[in-house]
Image (cartoon, helix red, strand yellow):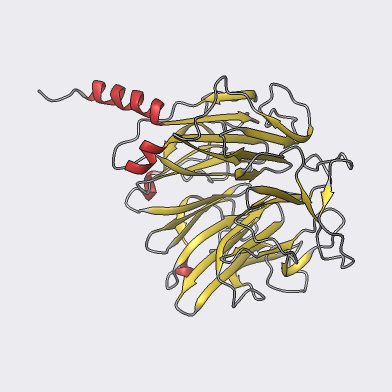
């Protein structure tokens, strides 16, 4: 006798709750928390996602923007939720969605990478094609115009190129292309603060992708963008940044190599600061507003440099004895995950995005309570930050190994 649809869905929901769990907190008035409610949450809220078919797989990564979220599954499908007034959710309408929904126009594609900007979104397919949607008024969709789109549209410029990643900032986009002649990074959208990295001259708007020079011979492993900041991490651990300067540092209109002996494995970019991960330790660049570790007695500067374009690397305090495995940066708040599965946050807390039960700012990392401990030997924990909200994905290793 065949299993009924109702019992199959119920069984899948039960399995999903044990194999993968997603929590969200912080700003939620546009539906970006995915709770079904349009309100801020000061403590972690467990989400109930739509039932995912075996073909869709489990959630393998998230991208959090100004007030919307893109969720990529291991089966190459995409769910979105949150603010949709500019078309950034990829649905036929331009309304907010407090509940996760599949992007149906991408159903016939296998999506491998997603990124969320302030009001726009990017999707990369396994064929190396790039699709963008949402606000295009600054040229950030790359369609050679300033039009907005409510569904993902292929970017013609990259039709004959192999796109691997896209990184969406507030009003600009970066694209990483892999080719036989080497890696190429392109920028388009707003370039007022140098975030496009394409010219030493002040450029306001670019609606056709232009290649970023200065890192032409560098093998790039990842790109990142947020606010008016841009960054690229090389395969051998070197960090390049450009765009709005950190703190009192001048803006850079071309990629600047961070001069340090450290080799980095991950970078997370905020509006006024960035986090970098190396050897299980976290360092911060910039941050002179809510996101800063503003207690000068706790800051450990690695070096002070005279060049006004060079940034100061600071070790994040109060993490001694903890090995950090994951980092994330919102507009002006930060989050990390330790090897033991402990989640800590700090910075701007106005909307409850620190998950501490209040709206206070924090100048040093504070542990977020979930009412139970994650099991480091059985769980994989990843954390993501939107501009004023935070999301945690816990996946059992049994689930991740069978996808």
Give the quadrant of residue 153.
Answer: bottom left
**Image quarter (top left, top right, bottom left or bottom right) of the C terminus:** top left
The residue at 29%/38% (across/down) is: 54
- Which quarter of the picture shows residue 172? bottom right
Question: Is 338 rendered above or below residue 302?
Answer: above
Image coordinates for residue 314, horizontal then vertical, percent: 79, 51
Give left or right: position of 310 versus 231. right
Q: Looking at this rendering, what residue extends furthest in the front direction?
A: 321
Q: Is residue 380 left or right of residue 225?
A: left
Q: Is residue 197 above or below residue 44?
A: below
Give coordinates of residue 256: x percent, y percent: 73, 68
Is residue 91 among the parts visible in the rendering? no
- Residue 31 falls in image quadrant: top right
From the viewer's side, name the closer residue of 345 and 57.
345
Which one is nearer the viewer's eye here, 208 or 183? 183
Q: Please state the horizontal and vertical placement of residue 138, each as a whole percent of the image.
A: 65, 58
> Which residue: 58% across, 69% down?
185
Compared to residue 233, the image places residue 61 above or below, namely above
Residue sitting farthest toward the left: 1
């Amino acid at each position: 006798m065949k299993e009924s649809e109702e019992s199959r869905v119920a069984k899948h929901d039960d399995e999903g709750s044990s194999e993968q769990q997603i929590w969200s907190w912080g700003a939620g008035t546009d539906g970006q928390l995915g709770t079904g409610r349009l309100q801020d949450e000061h403590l972690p809220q467990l989400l109930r996602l739509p039932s995912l078919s075996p073909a869709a797989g489990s959630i393998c990564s998230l991208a959090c923007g100004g007030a919307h979220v893109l969720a990529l599954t291991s089966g190459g499908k995409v769910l979105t939720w949150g603010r949709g007034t500019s078309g950034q959710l990829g649905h036929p309408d331009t309304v907010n969605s407090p509940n996760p929904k599949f992007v149906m126009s991408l159903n016939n594609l296998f999506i491998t990478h997603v990124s969320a900007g302030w009001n726009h979104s990017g999707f990369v397919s396994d064929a190396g094609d790039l699709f963008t949607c949402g606000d295009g008024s600054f040229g950030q969709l790359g369609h050679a115009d300033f039009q907005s789109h409510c569904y993902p549209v292929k970017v013609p410029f990259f039709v004959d190129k192999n796109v691997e990643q896209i990184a969406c900032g507030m009003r600009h986009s970066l694209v990483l292309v892999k080719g036989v002649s080497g890696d190429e990074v392109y920028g388009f959208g707003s370039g007022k603060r140098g975030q496009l990295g394409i010219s030493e001259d002040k450029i306001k708007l670019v609606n056709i992708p232009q290649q970023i020079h200065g890192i032409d011979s560098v093998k790039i492993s990842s790109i990142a963008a947020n606010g008016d900041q841009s960054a690229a991490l090389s395969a051998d651990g070197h960090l390049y940044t450009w765009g709005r300067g950190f703190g009192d540092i001048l803006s850079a209109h071309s990629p600047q190599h961070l001069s340090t002996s450290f080799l980095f494995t991950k970078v997370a970019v905020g509006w006024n600061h960035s986090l970098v991960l190396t050897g299980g330790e976290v360092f911060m660049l910039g941050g002179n507003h809510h996101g800063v570790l503003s207690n000068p007695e706790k800051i450990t500067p690695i070096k002070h440099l005279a060049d006004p374009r060079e940034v100061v690397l600071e070790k994040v305090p109060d993490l001694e004895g903890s090995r950090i495995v994951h980092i994330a940066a919102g507009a002006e708040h930060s989050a990390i995950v330790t090897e033991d599965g402990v989640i800590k946050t700090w910075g701007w807390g106005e909307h409850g995005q620190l998950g501490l039960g209040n709206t206070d700012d924090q100048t040093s990392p504070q542990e977020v309570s979930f009412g139970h401990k994650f099991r480091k030997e059985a769980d994989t924990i990843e954390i993501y930050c939107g501009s004023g909200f935070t999301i945690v994905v816990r996946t059992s290793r049994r689930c991740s190994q069978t996808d």
